[in-house]
């Protein structure tokens, strides 16, 4: 799931639930931006933020999470095409990229199957949330727009194994924040209680992974790699992916329980409390595997960006130790209580907007349109504005 980040909303502030300036614009002056099929959907829903039998807040939260799952599905399909177990379960098999797959297996021999199953999970989450909203008479216009061709304009990899389709997300210019690693291994700091504390990076300290591709952009990134003899450049691409997997799934681990605190309907709460733990399973798997990266330094021949992966399996302090995959206890709610092992962060304020900011900083949306960013921002603002209708004093 997409990453959470602390902080307040942007300069526009917290908009009222139901505000859909972008969709309204597309339904009127901006209508020519859409193909006829999408325009019919948009015109039918422009100016209408239908919540059906759900509260407006619950519908807004589900719409944002549905959008997040669509974005996740898009990025995971890219990883699956090149490095996942190949079958036709959710998309036509591409045959994969053997050398990239081999590089991923340095992290774990089962990596291709895990990539396949994570992809399958996110696709199922997106489909379920969309179907549930529709069953309650709530608008799905934004989700249908995101899931259609309109915003799928970003060129993907041209390496062997890629389908060559255009994408919603960009995996080739990533800035991966690896501070999630130390956040779960430091036992006296919690981002909910210490929002200004800077957690150290696990890779390339202090800056983390900057402007690196997590998939081979083309066959030149495979270079002269042969079975059992892979280039450091290809390994660095796979290791970047390994840490990116955990970065993405740590976000869902935090985002679902954060937004669950704002829902009203018990069935909607059940959905969030049921999907959220699968994200936690993903995160624990990926952080465990990322720790197996072997030490190397690589300079990208295209961008000049350098990355250094440390050996996290030996002679590391607790904050970097690879096998500490259970969350270390940390202060929770108040430092007056004993430390407690928890998901972190789970503060609700600005959780959805923080996720959008984190994904933007990650580089996933490089090349996307302003309209895409505005749509995603509106969805996040509406989700953050949601309140449990019988409690009016939540902040």
Image: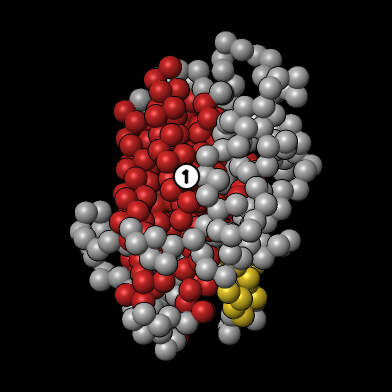
Q: Residue furthest top?
A: 390
Q: Residue at x 52, y 49 (%)?
A: 323
In the picture, the quarter occupied by the C terminus is top right
Residue 27 to residue 94: above or below? above
Q: Nearer the viewer, residue 381 or 94?
A: 94
Closest to the observer, 67 or 204:
204
Residue 91, placed above or below residue 273 = below
Q: Nearer the viewer, residue 55 or 128?
A: 128
Q: Residue at x 61, y 76 (%)?
A: 297
**In the displayed structure image, the side of residue 29 where residue 16 appears, left or right:** right
Residue 205 found in image quarter? bottom right
Crowd rating for badge 1 (residues with CA inside 10 Å; few <14, some 14–19, many 20+): some
Could you tell me residue 28's position as x and y percent? 52, 48
Is residue 87 visible in this depiction of the protein?
A: yes
SS at mark 1?
helix
Residue visible at 66% across and 32% down?
Answer: 330
From this viewpoint, which residue is outermost toward the right? Answer: 196
The residue furthest bottom is: 224
Q: Decide if residue 51 is in sight here.
A: no
Residue at x 39% of width, y 52% of height: 73
Residue 392 locus on image (x, y percent): 65, 14
Residue 142 quadrant: top left
Image label count: 1
| Residue 242: x %, y % from top left | 48, 60
Q: Is residue 298 above or below residue 78?
A: below
| Left or right: 232 as drawn, with respect to 150 | right
Image height of 261 relative to 1, above or below: above
| Furthest residue toward front | 315
């Amino acid at each position: 799931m997409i990453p959470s980040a602390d902080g307040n909303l942007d300069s526009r502030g917290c908009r009222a639930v139901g505000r859909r300036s972008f969709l309204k614009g597309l339904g009127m002056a901006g209508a020519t931006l859409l193909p006829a099929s999408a325009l019919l959907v948009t015109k039918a829903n422009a100016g209408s933020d239908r919540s059906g039998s759900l509260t407006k807040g619950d519908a807004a939260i589900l719409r944002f999470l549905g959008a997040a799952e669509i974005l996740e599905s898009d990025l995971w399909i890219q990883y699956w095409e090149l490095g996942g177990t190949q079958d036709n379960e959710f998309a036509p098999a591409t045959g994969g990229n053997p050398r990239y797959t081999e590089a991923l297996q340095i992290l774990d021999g089962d990596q291709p199957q895990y990539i396949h199953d994570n992809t399958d999970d996110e696709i199922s989450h997106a489909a379920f949330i969309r179907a549930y909203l529709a069953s309650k008479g709530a608008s799905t216009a934004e989700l249908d727009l995101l899931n259609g061709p309109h915003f799928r304009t970003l060129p993907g990899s041209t390496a062997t194994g890629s389908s060559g389709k255009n994408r919603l997300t960009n995996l080739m210019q990533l800035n991966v924040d690896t501070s999630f690693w130390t956040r779960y291994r430091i036992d006296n700091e919690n981002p909910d209680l210490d929002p200004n504390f800077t957690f150290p990076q696990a890779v390339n300290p202090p800056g983390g992974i900057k402007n690196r591709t997590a998939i081979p952009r083309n066959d030149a990134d495979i270079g002269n790699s042969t079975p059992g003899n892979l280039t450091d450049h290809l390994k660095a691409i796979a290791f970047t992916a390994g840490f990116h997997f955990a970065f993405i799934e740590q976000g869902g681990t935090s985002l679902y329980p954060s937004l669950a605190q704002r829902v009203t309907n018990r069935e909607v709460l059940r959905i969030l409390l049921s999907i959220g733990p699968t994200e936690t399973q993903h995160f624990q798997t990926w952080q465990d595997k990322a720790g197996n990266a072997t030490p190397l330094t690589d300079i990208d021949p295209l961008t000049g960006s350098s990355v250094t992966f440390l050996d996290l399996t030996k002679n590391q302090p607790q904050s970097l130790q690879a096998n500490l995959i259970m969350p270390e206890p940390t202060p929770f709610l108040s430092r007056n209580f004993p430390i407690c092992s928890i998901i972190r962060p789970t503060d609700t304020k600005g959780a959805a907007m923080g996720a959008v900011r984190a994904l933007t900083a990650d580089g996933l949306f490089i090349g996307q349109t302003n309209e895409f960013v505005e749509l995603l921002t509106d969805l996040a603002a509406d989700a953050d504005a949601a309140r449990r209708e019988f409690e009016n004093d939540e902040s």
